[in-house]
Image (spheres, rainbow, N blue to C red):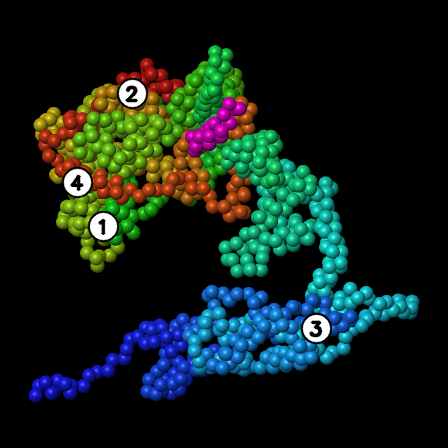
Amino acid sequence: MASEVTSTTPKKLVKPNAEGCKVCGITAQSNARAVISNSMGKSKLGKDFQAYCGIDVGEEKGRSVYCCRNCKLKLETIIKKIIDMREVFMKTNQEKTKRLRMPTGESPQPKKACVTIDQQPPVAKRGLAFSASRDENSVRNIDAAEKEKTSETNPPDTRNHDRQDTDNASDSVSLSHRSTPEINEHFGQSQGPPLSRQLLPFYRILQPPLIVVATGIMNLCSRPVVKSLSVLIEYTTGVKEMKQIPASRQSIGLTLTKGSDDDVAKAVMENEAVKRSCTANVLTELSDQCSKLCRVNNPSMLRSKTVRDIVSFKFGDFVNKELKERASLLYQFLFAVACSASGSRNTVKTPEKKILGMAMAAGILLKARNKDMCMAQVVTSLLLHNGGLSEMGFARLNKLEVSLSHTSTIRYNALMAEDFDADVKKWIESPQDKHLVKIVGDNIDTTIKKRDQRKDNPNTDFHWFLSMAFRGRISFANLPKERPIPDIERFPLTEFLLSPAEVVELKQHYSILLLRVLCNNISFLKSFKKFVPNHILHEYSVEMHQKSEERSLGLIFENENSTDGMAKIIETLHGYVPNGVGKVVFGGDQLTCERVTGVQRLRQTGRTQVERLDGFLPTAESWHAKMCLMMVIFKFLWNDKSAKDMGTLYQLRCATSRTNVTGDVKHEMNWSRDLIVDVTDAHCIIAAMKYFGLQSPDDVPKKNLPPSQSANAKVKKDWVHRSAMAILDNYVMADIGKIHSSVEASCNEQTCRRTQSRQQRGNGASADGASAGVQSNSSFLPWLSSVAQTSEASASTSDVDDTSEGTEDFVHNYACSLLFLGMLVKYYEDAIKEGDANREEKFWKIAMLIFKARINNQSNRVKYAFESFKYLALVKAVLPPQLAMKLKWGRFVNSKGGANNMECDRRLESEVRSVKDKMDGMGKNLTPASAQRIARSSNNTNVMVKNFDNHCEVHPQVLSHSKVSRELDLQIMVNDLLRQDVFECIPGRKHSAFPTHIRSPVHSLSASALLKWMKTLRRKFAHGNLSFLANEVED
């Protein structure tokens, strides 16, 4: 019973997913087929198959009939080609009918020869093909082809020739007037066996025999034929004259009476004789225009050879303003060659962007015509010479008229070197700008190694001096020029150290720098990034974000290592000191500054300012001070034997494969700086993870939790900055507080002693700025006092007794000192980028103590400590207010605009490197004259290159290298530091290479010695002696 029920259960009919194409028979999926017919009848697609291809797929009752996608696309291609062919067919018919109206009665075009089936071009292998049936018409077409082959062997009967032509003509006429479906019906096919690809029924429709079309049109022409053509000429005198036009020009005559200007021009160009004459006349006109362009009395832009014209030359202006107006034919020819009709669709190479190629092509042609038309080659040659093209390169390009010869290029380069200091002279002559001039100089050394070195042919060493002039961006002309009100001898020494207010401001700036690192590397802090400013603004931020004006002053062929050479250098540069200004700031490294001061001391007995050479105010620039600080850091934290000590600078360098850092900061400045910055960022991340209780940068905080997401922006901002300051208090700001007790005791003792003596004389103020009622917590280093109090308030990171080696964590000390010094470097770099002289002044106050202290019982950097004190004294007490502000805010230069300021001596180092690279390219041919030409021509050459890049839309060269991602290195450093847990105070820990590392880098600085040193310098400056004397200022 169950089986019977099962056998009679109805089954659901499922429509097959794939079905065969009714045209080609290929099985097609449902998403790759189209409906030909259904229960409602044939679709448009089915009707098109029957009309254009003669394929009737039929209809099936109750179901749909499909074809594949390929058949549908081929049908659409057939329809398009048939319609296009019909339009071309009709157009050709009309054109050939017009050409029959000639006076001779013959067509000017030769008759087309009969083309047989064998002579027809082979069918393309990718031709359209369908699997269709063949009917009687198909067989008839094949038989006709066979008969045509036979007719080639056996000539046809001449009696039926006329009849055949008439039949062909009638076929052509009917073909030209029939509709498209009729044409397909005429050449179509019906049911039958499938045809091969080479015998498609629509092949003749796409390529009809030429003999049928031509002969049919010839027989259909019934219009009269022109036998002769004459022109009636009527003069103003009333005389009339009839002239017959030659047969070769009658087509032009007919076009003159009926056609447009374009038709007449086409008729002229079809006549070879007239065409040659027109071409000759056009070429004559072109030559005349070029001759006028090359005339001396009306000179072209290409003929000018002045420096001003070379610098400001624009290829686009030459084409659009001069060539287009004075040589229009040449312009049109070049435009036709460069800009094709099809190329107008190219949105990248527009005609406007092809103007440069047209200008260079015109320059090459005109230079070949007249050697004085060489402005394009002059600019090109100077660009190539600035890029370092060799002499043989110039020789090759000169043969192509692309550039000048190497000798001519050198001559124009010397022309560019003329008036190299014209802008600087304008500055010093201008009442508004003469207060803004600053000069920076440095030595430039190079060696020419001889291939055949002999006793009489040794290597040659050159020791020269390169200088640059900068124009300041801030004017202090409204400030007084008199001497400052405070007396340096009675100036309080506390002004040379950080005040409590400055410590608070320093901590705020440190917190911003710290948050920039944390918000980019700790996951839960990334949402707080919007509360961290990108720029720390100051009172002159707008001016410091503007571009600076700078000019090279060339080379001085004197050696600064000798006193006589330095004196000649100062005498040469003293010509740029404006009259009545007082002093011009002269910057350089510490050694150059010291030598300038020494020469001024030797000339101090001179009668005039020029003889005394006191028009310059020498000062040590900041970039060399930063290099000195980097040397101190590496001396304090670097040890080649600490590879196994996890968390040390050398171990992290090895872990990240920074093999380019070897500890030689002087020759590896940039690489060493990158390592310090990356290691500092890793320590910042570890310190924040310790503060928030994170196990990884992607973890959620377990301590010091952030406010809720619903909190307002002010609460979130206050929390994130408060957290950053707490991290700084724990690990950064206390690093220099360990010397507070000794400094405080020494300073308080001396201060109280002086206070008592002054009170006995009735004076209530001390010479060092301390009040009579000084308390025990006051000192000349108040910021150290605040730091010490802050560090004592932090229970988690309280300092241990220095005298107890067994209870102190030297690993923790090492990490804190590295973080402090690294943050100081980042603070300095950000201040320089923003052009903030106030923050730079705080850096000098901290750096003075670091330079003065002995690191690892080695010699200190007492010369840069002296320069630090000297700079602070000049700005605060020695110089008049106008010159002091000029010295303070003129230490930065900006070549790109925005927050991209740099130190003046760093910009000079870049210029020295550029000049040395060009000199090295000259090899043994280097002479003082060629080196001077290179140095002095850089001003005008740089302006020319900038102008060329602007109007040619050349993207500026990226001066800095592309930044390679440092995420992997940071991850490695963070993992190593996290494994060592460097910020957890564990008594007794130490590194094998740093067994007794003291946390403070100034732990060896004696407070009494520091006070004595500062007093000595203050007394020297009060007497006008600003030079460095080692035996007077050493401890």
Disc number for residue 761? none
- Find disc 3 in the rendering and name its residue: 98
362 drawn magenta: no
Q: Position of residue 836 (x, y in %)?
A: 37, 38
Upstream in sequence: badge 4 or badge 1: 1
Q: Residues within 10 Å of mark 3 (few under 14, many from 20)?
A: few
Q: Residues within 10 Å of mark 4 (few under 14, many from 20)?
A: many
Three-letter code for the amino acid on which mark 3 is drawn: Lys
Q: Which circle, 4 or 2, is nearer the viewer?
A: 4
Closer to us: 377 or 906: 377
Give the alpha-carbon distance from disc 4 to disc 2, as whole Å: 43 Å
- Indicate which disc, 1 or 2, sits on the residue closer to the N terminus: 1
The mark lying in front, picked from 1 and 2, is: 1
How far apart, in angstroms, are the residues tagged by discs 4 and 3?
A: 94 Å
Image disc number at residue 978: 4
Q: Is residue 434 visible?
A: no
Q: Position of residue 611 (x, y in %)?
A: 52, 18
- For the residue labelled by badge 4, is the local secondary structure a helix, a strand or a loop? helix
Magenta residues, as a range? 907-926
* Image side of residue 789 versus residue 1031, left or right: left
Amino acid carrying mark 1 in the image: Ser
Question: Residue at left 35%, top 25%?
Answer: 867
Q: Main secondary structure of the magenta part?
A: helix
Residue for badge 2: 1013
Instruction: Find numbered disc 3 in the image and state the secondary structure of the residue it sits on.
Output: helix
| Amino acid identity at mark 2 | Trp
Foreground of the two, 845 or 167: 167
Q: Nearer the viewer, mark 3 or mark 1?
A: 3
- Residue drawn at 42 percent across, 30 percent down: 909
Q: Is residue 252 above or below residue 829?
A: below
Q: Which residue bears the numbered disc 1?
A: 523
Residue 260 vs 935, above or below: the answer is: below
